[in-house]
Amino acid sequence: MTALALVGCGGMGRRHIKGMGRLRAVGKLNFELAAVCDVMPASADAAADMASDLVGSRPDTYADVETMLKAVKPDGIIITTTPETHTDVGMAALAVGAHIMAEKPITLTVAEGVRLVEAAKRAGLRLAVAENYRRDPINRLARALIDAGAVGRPFLAVQASSSSGEKVIITPWRHRKNRGGITVDMGVHYTDILEYFLGEMTTVFGMNAVVDAERVDAEGKLHAADAEDLSVGVAQFANGALANWMLSMAGRGENYFK
């Protein structure tokens, strides 16, 4: 049976385990979760306990990726750590012959992404991104209608959203530049959907800014925020279509998405 390992046992890692549980419930679980790894042993233990309940067996736990890879030798790994670690974890996995599914963003920079993609190609291994928006049934339907010509020839896309002003969004680390920032964390969803609908972007231009240098969490505690929370951009696609894109995670008033 295919053996998988999960690296990163925080909120997103637990979501993946829940997904495995749903596969098991409908008889589609065709792999073993052999190991989970997190720098916080308590998080790894909690994830292993969850897997025991939902997946049917308790994976081994590790606090170090290299140690886990040598001991388990998984066929593939799922990377659900914070974005700045994806490149190192991914390169370590490829070095031992493991396929990869990484949470988005795949890396923090284009250069790191290219490095990881090229390394996977050289190794003859799969590298997938856990991008979920294009798998939403409504987006699949929209793509099918576009492909069938049911909506004519798309020539312009406009995407704009505004929300969350001054508040911590999910976790404080999402507002730190060295971990990508919230417009990267969320923006990859929306730009991916644009390419899913309209094809490859050939020209892009964008600007961004930091609006809120501090964010307040649910308990009223302030957190430094040095990552951009406002981004705007324009793009042209290979088919000639244009897009106007705006993502504000510093909006005031009513949240909106269009």
Image (spheres, helix red, strand yellow):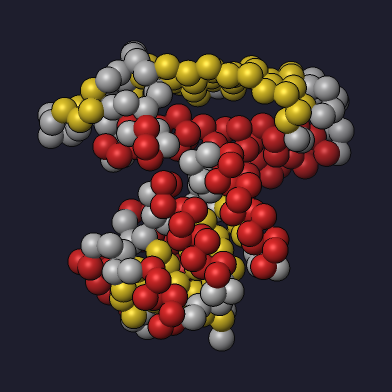
Give the position of the C terminus as an image quadrant. Answer: top right
Q: Is residue 52 left or right of residue 217?
A: right
One can see residue 134 in this view: yes
- Quadrant for the N terminus in the image: bottom right
Tell me the quarter of the picture where residue 243 sits.
top right
Number of numbered discs present?
A: 0
- 44, above or below 108, in the image: below
Residue 172 screen position, x and y as percent = 26, 37
Q: Measured from the top left, where is residue 247 in percent x and y?
A: 49, 22
Q: Quadrant of residue 39?
A: bottom left
Q: Residue at the location (33% across, 34% down)?
A: 176
Relative height, residue 177 to residue 130 (above, below): above
Q: Residue furthest left?
A: 220
Please tell me which residue is depicted at 23% across the width and 23% down the height of the picture: 214
| Residue 164 locus on image (x, y percent) | 34, 24
Q: Residue at x 52, y 61 (%)?
A: 91
Image location of residue 19, percent across then percent down: 46, 63
Q: Return the residue nearer the eye: 79 or 85.
A: 85
Horizontal side of 126 relative to 210 (left or right) equals right
- Asked whether residue 21 appears in the rendered view, the answer is no
| Residue 14 to residue 189: above or below | below
Q: Is residue 157 above or below residue 189?
A: above
Which residue corresponds to the image point at 37% horizontal and 32% vertical from the top-left? 177
